[in-house]
Amino acid sequence: MYRRKVQITGGSTFFVTLPKDWATSAGIHGKDEVRLIPTETNALLLIPKRAADANRCRIDLGDWEFDRLQREIFSRYIAGYNIIEVRGERIHPRQRRSVREAAQALVGLEILEETQSTVVLHSVVDIKDFPIERTLRRIFDITRAMFADAATAFLECDSDLAEDVQERDGDVDRLVLLIARQLNLLLRDLVLPGEVQLSKVEFLHHNEVADQLERIADHAGKISEAAAALTQPVPEEVARSVRLSAEASMKVLDEAMNAFLDQDVDRANAVLSEKGVGEKLFEQALLQSPMRQPENSYPISIFLDSCLRITEYGYNIAENALDASVPLCSWTPDSEAPSEGP
């Protein structure tokens, strides 16, 4: 930590000096321009002009298979690096194909340069083209449709629809990873709150909701796999219980997401007030329904368990709606002391 006294010159201008060792390490020289950004907590953020220019990293390639290489690239993309250089003594064609596949699974990551020993990936995403609110709504729309179609595929034994649901999971993953990248850029001060129209705390809540939606999409995929595992159509008595469970989960999800997107505290509380009752109903269905058709007990159990998990993720989203509604206020000497309770 550096400490400086605020000085006044000319009777009205406040100024502080910059620590020389920090300025040198940041590449700041005389007459250079820096940006000073006020934050929501009344802190003042100082950003050197060249900070974003150094936003690149290198991966020293080992004898890795696709999964390891993909994780290495994904982690750097999420961290917010603009340029990712994959380097090895000689990159094997198999590894080169893996790099391409990994890049294709991420929004806006393109191959900028290739040699025998390097592959340079460049992020061409402009954060302004993907506003967080619109991206989150898109994730929700895809996830909701996946869940609805997975339930239909299960009830109607529609294997083609079940396969289509699983294929859409990749679309959700790509957008969730994009939001995670944007959050890291914001945390590293390479993107400013004014550019995303949200504070860091607000963006964090959006990222948490995106994670919950990703888990819901995964369970929609599990339901579609359960649909493909059915040995015969589900009898009407069981189908009725399954349908009601899906509808109850969908209602919680819809209400929770609307509460979050509309910043509706009353709606979020209404969702959470039903939490105990809903969980008991799901537990009863999970215990009883599989016994009515033993030959399909496993896929039925998977369906009902996934509905229960989706409902729990819906409650998590409602809780995020409450957390996100808390105003971020800054205390100053001229204001009243902050209250310690409601």
Image (cartoon, rainbow, N blue to C red):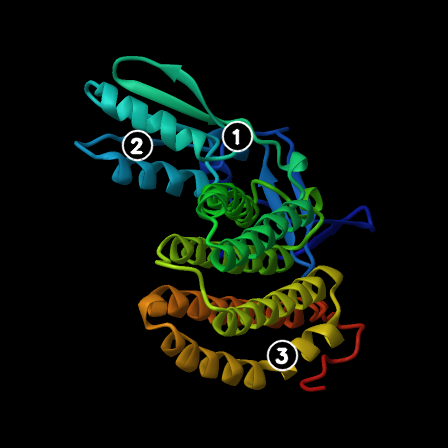
Residue at the image point whose x is 37% and y is 29% from the top: 101
Question: Which quadrant is home to the C terminus?
Answer: bottom right
Can I make out residue 85 in this image?
no
Vertical placement of 111 versus 299: above or below? Answer: above
- Crowdedness near tag 2: few (<14), some (14–19) or many (≥20) residues, C-alpha within 10 Å: some
The residue carrying pointer 3 sits among few (fewer than 14), some (14 to 19) or many (20 or more) residues within 10 Å by Cα, namely some
Which residue type does callout 2 highlight? Answer: Ile
For disc 2, the marked residue is 59
Front residue of this view, candidates 48 and 270: 270
Residue that appears at 59% across and 51% down: 145
Q: Are marks 3 and 1 in contact (CB under 8 Å)?
A: no
Secondary structure category for the residue under label 3: helix
Contact flag, marks 2 and 3 (Cβ < 8 Å): no
Location of mark 3 (residue): 272
Mark closer to the chain start, 3 or 1: 1
108 w.r.t. 247: above or below: above
What is the C-alpha distance between the residues marked 2 and 3? Answer: 45 Å
Q: Is residue 88 left or right of residue 27?
A: left
> Could you say where residue 109 lies in the image, as x and y percent from the top left?
48, 29
Percent position (x, y) of residue 27?
49, 32
Amino acid type, residue under disc 1 in the picture:
Gly
The circle on residue 108 is 1
Q: Earlier in the sequence, mark 2 or mark 3?
A: 2
**Which residue in the rendered view is the most extreme toward the right?**
11
User: Considering only order in the chain, which callout, 1 or 2, is on the residue closer to the N terminus?
Assistant: 2
Q: At x 82% / y 50%, what residue is drawn?
A: 12
Can the viewer see residue 96 in this picture?
yes
Of circles 2 and 1, the one toward us is: 1
Are circles 2 and 1 on residues that touch, CB within 8 Å? no
Q: CA distance from mark 3 to mark 1?
A: 38 Å
Task: Determine which of the numbered discs, if any, sits on residue 147 in the image.
Answer: none
